[in-house]
Image (cartoon, coloured by chain):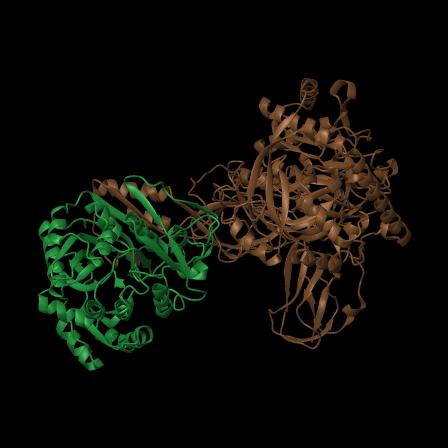
Chain colours: A brown, B green
Amino acid sequence: MLAKVIVHEASREAALATLDTALANTGIEGIETNREYVRTILQEPVFAQGQMTTRYLNGFTYQPFTIDVLAGGTMTTVQDYPGRSGYWPVGVPPSGPFDNLSFRLGNRLLGNDDSAAGLEFTLNGPTLKFNQATRIALTGAHMQATLDGQALDSYQPIAVQPGQTLKLGKVSGHGARAYLAVAGGIQCTPYLGSRSTFTLGQFGGHGGRALRTGDVLHFVETAETSATVTVPDTLKPALGSTWTLRVIYGPHGAPDFFTDDDMAMFFSTDWQVHYNSSRTGIRLVGPRPSWARSDGGEAGMHPSNIHDNAYAVGTVDFTGDMPVILGPDGPSLGGFVCPATVILADRWKLGQLKAGDTLRFEPVSLDDADALAAEQDACITALSSPKKTANAVAITTPILNTLDKSEAGVEVVYRAAGDRYLLVEYGPLVLDLRLRFRAHALMLWLEEQQLDGVIELTPGIRSLQIHFDPQVLTRQTLLDILASAERELQKQEDLEVPSRIVHIPLSWDDEACHQAIEKYMQSVRKDAPWCPSNLEFIRRINGLDSIDAVKHILFSGRYVVMGLGDVYLGAPVATPYDPRHRLVTTKYNPARTWTAENSVGIGGAYLCVYGMEGPGGYQFVGRTLQMWNRYRQTGAFDKPWLLRFFDQICFYEVSHEELQQIRRDFLKGQYPITVEETTFSLNEYQQFLDENQQDITRFTEARNQAFHEELQRWVESGQINFQSQQDLNEENGADEVDGTPVESPVAGNIWKLKVAEGDTVQEGDVVAVLESMKMEIEITAPETGKVLAITRQEGQQVNAGQAVMVLD
Amino acid sequence: MFNKVLIANRGAIATRITRTLQKLGITAVAVYAEADRDSLHVMQADEAHSLGEGSAQDTYLNQDALFSLMEARGIDAVHPGYGFLSENPDFVKGCEARGIAFIGPTPEQMNTFGLKHTARALAEKTGVPLLPGTDLLDDKSAALKAAEKIGYPVMLKSTAGGGGIGMQICDDADSLDKAWDTVRRLSANNFSNDGVFIEKYIARARHIEVQVFGDGKGKAVTLGERDCSAQRRHQKVLEETPAPNLPDAVRAALQDTARALMEAVQYRNAGTVEFILDQDTNAFYFLEVNTRLQVEHGVTEQVYGVDLVEWMVRLAAGDLPSLETLARNLTPCGHAIQARLYAEDPNKDFQPSAGLLTSVHFPGTTARCCASTTGSKRGSPSLPCLTPCWPR
């Protein structure tokens, strides 16, 4: 029993009405309850008349507006458009349908609101049983679909009768994702304003996860409509295996970060989609840039490293030498350069890219991008054919405007980050809290203005990203407003902002960090300079005598929070108040595919706490408590995120076991932390720097020398030229063993082999676990038999349809 | 009055008892299985003690663990709530042997009403109308003969049964013949007692029960009747008081009958006498007595404006005014209904539903509506063992 609801009124009639209202106002989600069932009984005349008998309900039929999930499919999630908006500054991605065009057309076919929630299917679809009549529409990639055995077509409304079962098969042909719209939309309580599932954050949609067998989805009763609508073929997403993605050049390009040749290479390469692509990002395989810089300076050793800034959704992010196109579940903040950003009108294509597809980037103008976005909206509304085209333009510069020092006190650069974002950068490429203050000041100023068309303001280390809608607020108007803002802000003398000193525990060199390093060595890079010990690497690259010295510095520092959401969910990127506590490292290249939630790492000159499980690149020092509280408000969490901009973090040491207990208690409000209210004054900070000038310089010089020595060692060993191994098409001779092959359903990396040669397996046994598209996918034995040969080993890559082992 | 009372229960009833204990200035002591460590009943209590890991058998039903805890913590009295040990006479004896007051009836009363055939015998003696039926039956042929005399349909019932297990409606001799072995086997398996008997079966039956409170010295009062006819698989879904659509004379007769039965055994503390009422004739028949507080006690409290848990505690402490005094102020007012929310899927044969609660919203407590929860919170797992594990 979950609860009992008791009402008391003057009369029975009034009591029945009040109870019904109370039940209507009761919401319990994540599991099924008898709430609607009880409400239905209240409506029964026999109950209303007080003639209920004990046998009555045995013959009472109840048909809820629900969908039973009979099989979940590879990755089926609830999504809505445009997803979660307004939380980019604290590291919450928009989520929403990866192919938003297909998704929106599905809603349009049923006459749904644009915001109605539907389902996204990946590779293999689910099996769904409808318990009431409704209408549905399938869109996106072609998936074999039957309703009680009858084949269904995509792109048309389909009437479903109570009790009918919709069975989706594999994607056949091009594309990767299909969509199901249901009349009136899938019902669930929005989380932070959206029903979209963000699986990494474990919230939104149904249970914050992909659907699985036994789940129950809810929908609403809707009126029949007789109007038939059709989608013109030209409006349907054109799927293929070779793609052209139209992009806006920037935010970071040549000559500062890339060479002109790099950019020419970038736009002329047929990039191949890597198997390890997912809703967070599409990894690409192709040539390596030669880079305009030798390293990232303070931001890290690799030339792709920059001081962390907010990313645009759809941007092409060079994580080391390997580009990743940021998807709808991608991170908000990061320190890698992005030379191009996919335009809004083409963002849907990202959702249909399949491992092995090839694509080219084509630069277009901002004006064309705006026109295409506006036309796409109009065509979806009118179900008309798009007419506009955009010509490839020669790339010039991603910089839209600059203010010089005399105008703004510091140089300000305005960069286009695609057609929906502006990136405002302050001063030189250095870590300077004074620059961070400027970004903060602009953010506060813009928040006060409440401009129509400004969607999100996300500060980075020396930048502020402005997410805006150019159809409401033109780019030029925004640029003009921003320039006048800087002139006004110039007049402020001292800046003092509220700040809190937040004391939190840290388990030094935690077991979870060891696990992530092992996983990285197995499936990404065996011999990286930071393996097997990140701490030894930090010691070496900072020229310290011992790992204890690293530890001493870490626990002495006060870390000022400059960004939230690095990586994800309120995770802070912070830098020590005292430059003598600044440890510098390079980030992983290529990045890790897995990091434990709340690991604490150092990358460039920053310290960050990973908000959640996921990819990452910072060097581990330990693990701390949660930065995000998904469901509960406690003393520390009045919002889901713990920290605010300009908080100062202080760590104290706890053991691995202690941390386990703290992590169990903290979210429930049973582990209090100490928070001191204070302010952060720029003038005071300047004074502190002046007083310790000599000592700071000495520390910094010693550190810089060690950093360059490490770099030199990489040059000598060749490690600096590390390139990812792409052997997707490499055949392995062992495939020739005679017998029944156990084939991999998708391209991926063998994560675990569950059997050895000579073992006998039963049909349906899990024989191996694959890591693909950031998911662990089980491979099962197609029949009972003995394992003759294992043809792929742990850590090796495998193509879809390739044999992992052979059964007798 | 007691200083410290232990609540040998969990969930909604534990929080309900805690509320009254704290109102009376008594230290409320909770116990919990490790799986319930974060439950509301643990957080709200003044003291909480772990019963370790494991099933209900290892924790809430572990009398040895409870007794040593009670002795170590200086407990004066124990409130059993409903379910678990609430109707276990050995537990009552164990408490009383240790000088700890048990807030409820005597072990003898539990024994008398616990087995249906002794309860029937007592009812018969007291003049409570009984459904035409038999004593315990030894063999099938006796059953068939008796059923012929009573007239079909009949109900074949286990004497120790409950919660719908060990009951079978038989429309004719054939179906009785088939049901005989099944009911006996189920009864033996579930209740370690294969005694069965037969009763007349009423097709259009209502479930009406009377709330009684006895002082243990031969005096009892009734607090109206509740209609709990809305049941699915013998699980009550909706409960209300007063029962609708009932002539006043019947209402009065129900209460007089219940009071007489309970006074006959000098019933102590709160109990409920359940009746079957024939919708077509308004004739009523004795069903059973529940020797404990019930889930649906809340609707009676609303209509009578009383705190039954307070009465229970005060009586056990020897601190309750005389029932004559209390009865003078008992005036029913208005109508109350309770709905039980279960974690189950009514569309899949009411199979229990377990998982993470991603969104929980209850209607705000107002003068006219209150939601008493088992501690369901957003982000809590709904444990499969919770649903619906309490016998009525």
Of residues A773 and A706, the one nearer the viewer is A706
Point out the image quarter for the N terminus of chain A: bottom left
In which quadrant of the rendered view does residue A347 lie? top right
Judged from this view, the residue extending furthest toward the right is A716
Indicate left or right for A362 with A662 as reference: right
Indicate left or right for B145 with A88 as reference: left
**Residue at 22 percent of width and 80 percent of height:** B140
Give the image location of residue B347, x and y in percent.
40, 55
Give the image location of residue B199, x and y in percent.
18, 70
**Residue at 29 percent of width and 41 percent of height:** A18
Q: Is residue B163 visible?
A: yes
Q: Give above or below for A587 relative to A454.
A: below
Of residues A233 and A293, the one nearer the viewer is A293
User: How many dots with numbers?
Assistant: 0
**Residue at 74 percent of width and 20 percent of height:** A408
Q: Is residue A44 visible?
A: no
Point out the image quarter for the C terminus of chain A: bottom right
Indicate left or right for A250 with A56 as reference: right
Q: Give above or below for B273 relative to A271.
A: below
Give the image location of residue A57, x and y in percent.
29, 56
In which quadrant of the rendered view does residue A526 lie? bottom right
Give the image location of residue A567, x and y in percent.
66, 44
Indicate left or right for B122 with A404 as reference: left
